[in-house]
């Protein structure tokens, strides 16, 4: 009963590039603290920061057949997002699939399950955010679906939504909202830059943000 | 109902420096295997080894207001220790707060909750031991307390107690006991150095520690 | 009631070296997806890839006495495998024991419990796959056994079985089967090399593996 | 930035009653194995089986203010569904709120956080499926939203969707699809009843479902 | 290095009885939301509600020797509180120890580890709040301490502090504060009774607590 | 590559009945504290105590096809033991399979995965020890094996081994050792009965077991 949706809309590439610059924490704040995946999603190596359009995969537990199907649907700048239909720590993805995905322009993988060959994947510079690292292989027996809405690590991801991922985790931005979120995120960064200088000079947040009065009203006592 | 205790006593800076030299495993042994925080407290990057005086924070879940209050109380060589009053994986602390804390002489953060901006924090060299890494932001709505006793990751920490942290985890040393613990830790290190040489030369622990007789008494059989 | 089995059989050193080359994911596939330890077993530093003969330890919770006993039984190229009889995150093993084990030719440690001194162990280049990192020490009160079959992280390990470990986790190969598994693993690697080139050139797994027909039969629809 | 949506559509009460009869496992199968909440959602007492329309709550961690707001929106036959915006095990809900919700016709609560007063709630016969039981109280400081789409325990719940819950867990059925899912579920139950009789008489599933041939083709060997 | 403190002070028996009446959630609120043990502490059977004076045990992992020592220190109305020095799920306590503890007037056990013989313990009506149920036995090899301060399931418990436990979990009340906490808890219960009647009659919390204005100020919108 | 072993040896039915009488904690002690499954294996309802011969199932994640195959292999008094090859919380087993298994004389199920229809299974009196309760269904796509050795919840189970299960958990006894273990368990129970009387009369374990001297030698101090 699986389906593959072949034509999905994607956000503007410049907007996507801008969101990558801003990073997960800023983007997440800029869209009202929504869209974050569970904090158990960790990068296989530190230092990557990417954004791209989601090509989604709904896959049975321990079955990676749909990854092959999804790779054909990739366009330059996409990110694969895989959600298993039942928890699994099996290694759905390794260096061969990464080779294939990179050849199609894929920027990375977000998977609420396991991956393997992480030493090779690190050398190749293919970034992955996963729930597990596990050498356990998978079968190719049961179809799932590609480019349908999935719930991945607790967050709803629609095909074509923008995924932002860095060392702080993974965040999803609705495709239609990406431009507005970028504006809000850039405003936030400009604002932060000014504050960073004042804080580095030893000024206190209590004074910069004018918090002393409100803390007093709420009953904070110094003893 | 929050309070801030402004004047706390701290241990002798030379004793604190000595405890940092010894490291967590040795200090923990030297004070009778007590004071260790839960092993889920992990460093955001490897290689840091610090000691300092605890400035403690009791904060509501998902509310980092008290961190701003605590930063004003920091003196050179202090370490922030934050315990939420209910479990939370939210990111209480990021690069702006670290900039502010470093400007006040803070050596690091120990937090039984989440942090974010870990790529920037790594570049800045601000060491953190946390339960989670998570981009989820926090609010500033409910006061907590600063410099009251807290239970952080299962261990009681009083303000002014000495925190020792390295790649093995985090240990707390009572302020009044810090001098005695340092003496015991240094004796232990000297003793270990001698043993390391004999073990590196191929001598067995069974012989160095005279264990063969006692194992026989306890019924160990070779077959 | 503890016992120590002194003479165990080991696999052919060249076969062991060959298995190390292949790595965990390939070896695990080559022996029919069996023998993998639970995915919570993680390396203390990235990049190590080893294979060796298992010297097994069954130890009480929080008691590392048997590690000293096991070190005497080590031969060049062995790997220590420790399973506690009840869950424990205590640090059974640190830099002194590693110094002693290395002096006896030990290649590494696999332990379903905790280790400590990980900064020193990383500098020494002694690789460990563990369930926890924890500075909590252990006692030497109750004997266990050495070189008996143990269940470690969910997998049965017999003394003399071959352990393969890398960044993907840990796999055990039965001693008697090691030669056959190596042949199957090497065949698999040769096959993968050819596929990697085709995938890197942009060919799809769907075509290389002829999956399109079977997916259609199973009802996959493109929309 | 919180909002409350006051008028939501609900499914036909007879359809809802029919879905309660079928139970979670059957409904979940009948809609293509989708819509299940994570298996950590457990009933506070055994034996309840309910269905109703979701009134959803998105609440900050450790803040139950929105529960009061949501109770005003309840109609007879509704079920409250609460998702915190960051993980929390705090007790958001106890016997006073249950008294209020029951007075408004509420059939139960599904909450990806904690509840308390479970002895009283059991005596009152107010069924709850929760992630935690915890006496820790909450504050009323930060607004959230009522009747917006939420992701609860990994599943997307829209306001007005049908919630089915019993000892096997919790399942959500899209409001628009409820009638069709009920038909499929009833067909499934009729079919199961016939099979149950044959199985009780000792006939084998291998024969009833004609599995022997297909197992042979897949290579199963009897030895 | 273990010690046993023989004479500890206890709170007034009438105050203790009053705290049992109030239950964990009310007592925890009445003392400013402090003193709660982690929510993973669950009763072995539903329906018990007790309070008593803590006789504390600090025990090594997998070693229940100190339970025998502690039983001698019990007085009528006491509750045993056991904290292991390293995590353990072993079964420290079963029906024989319960028989002995009951003969000394003990009201129950709170243990951040495992227990066994739970079917017999249920029949005997000896209530236990534990982290695990596990048949794994323990040894009697290493002394610990009795009646020293312990951190149990994340909360500090001093000998003689009052333990309150029911189906919602476990809470500790400082011995010196027990009388004041009881007064605050009883006031809270009287207040709740009045509210319960109004809520049962269909009045809304929004009106009873006058929340509408404050929600409007915080920006809540009805749409 | 699946296999089904059709003829397995079983232990003497009277020995099996005797082991059920003794219960898990006693049997586990009597065989030297070995053979216990992980403590996360919990009964779906309290009060059952059974023993029987293991018919083992090695099954892929989320695929219950082999349960049908295994049911044909059941003889009167057997217990099904299912271990998935990769972690899964899916519901492999429900009321239809239980109807079929009971018709073949099966006494219960031990499964390191999920089950569903637990309300019906409770009414039918079919006891199950599982890792999860979950309504998520499974497929029938990939063969596994029946009556091969499996590692279930961390313990090795051979086909024909005796499974003992009650409210304390699950224990496996090697088939060849079952008679000896029963003798040791019965001796242990007789011994416990005498001690229970003395303890109920208020005598202390410290005196009955003569522990005072040994505690003194180990350095325990009364203060």
Image (cartoon, coloured by chain):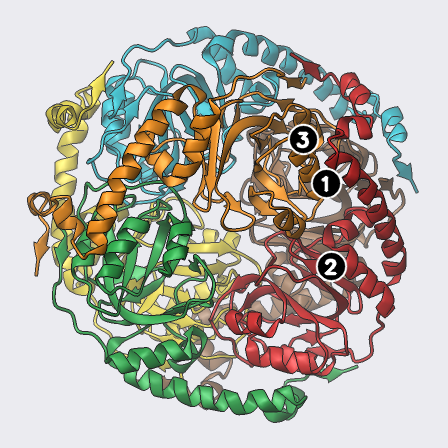
Chain colours: A orange, B green, C red, D cyan, E yellow, F brown
Residue F209 vertical position relative to residue D164 in the rendered view, above or below = below
Indicate whether B33 appears above or below E33.
below
Q: From the viewer's side, name the closer residue of F205 and A120.
A: A120
Q: Name the residue under label 3.
A: A67
Tell me the CA gap for discs 3 and 1. 12 Å
Which of disc 1 and disc 3 is earlier in sequence? 3
* Disc marking residue C156: 2
Residues tagged 3 and 2 counted as in contact (Cβ below 8 A): no
Chain that bears disc 2? C
Horizontal relation, residue D86 to residue C155: left or right? left
Horizontal and vertical percent position of residue B32: 40, 80
Task: Work out whether residue A131 can be spotted.
Answer: yes
The residue at 18%/25% (across/down) is E219
Dot 1 and dot 2 residues touching (CB under 8 Å):
no
The residue labelled by disc 1 is: A96
Is F76 in front, or is A18? Answer: A18
Give residue D19's position: percent from left, percent from top: 51, 15
Tell me the subunit letter for badge 3: A
């Amino acid at each position: 009963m699986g389906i593959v949706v072949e034509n999905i809309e994607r956000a503007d590439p410049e907007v996507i590039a801008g969101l990558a610059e801003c990073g997960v924490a800023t983007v997440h704040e800029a869209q009202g603290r929504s869209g974050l995946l569970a904090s158990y999603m960790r990068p296989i190596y530190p230092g990557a920061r990417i954004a791209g359009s989601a090509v989604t995969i709904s896959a049975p537990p321990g079955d990676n057949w749909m990854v092959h199907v999804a790779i054909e649907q990739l366009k330059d700048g996409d990110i694969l997002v895989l959600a298993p239909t039942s928890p699994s720590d099996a290694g759905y993805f390794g260096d061969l699939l990464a080779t294939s995905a990179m050849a199609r322009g894929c920027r990375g993988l977000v998977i609420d399950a396991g991956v393997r060959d992480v030493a090779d994947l690190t050398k190749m510079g293919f970034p992955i955010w996963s729930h597990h690292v596990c050498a356990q292989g998978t079968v190719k027996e049961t179809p799932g679906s590609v480019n349908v809405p999935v719930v991945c690590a607790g967050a709803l991801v629609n095909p074509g939504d923008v995924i932002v991922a860095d060392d702080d985790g993974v965040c999803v931005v609705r495709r239609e909202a990406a431009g507005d979120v970028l504006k809000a995120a850039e405003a936030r960064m400009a604002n932060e830059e000014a504050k960073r200088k004042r804080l580095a000079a030893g000024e206190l947040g209590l004074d910069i943000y004018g918090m002393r009065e409100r803390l007093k009203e709420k009953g904070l006592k110094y003893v």
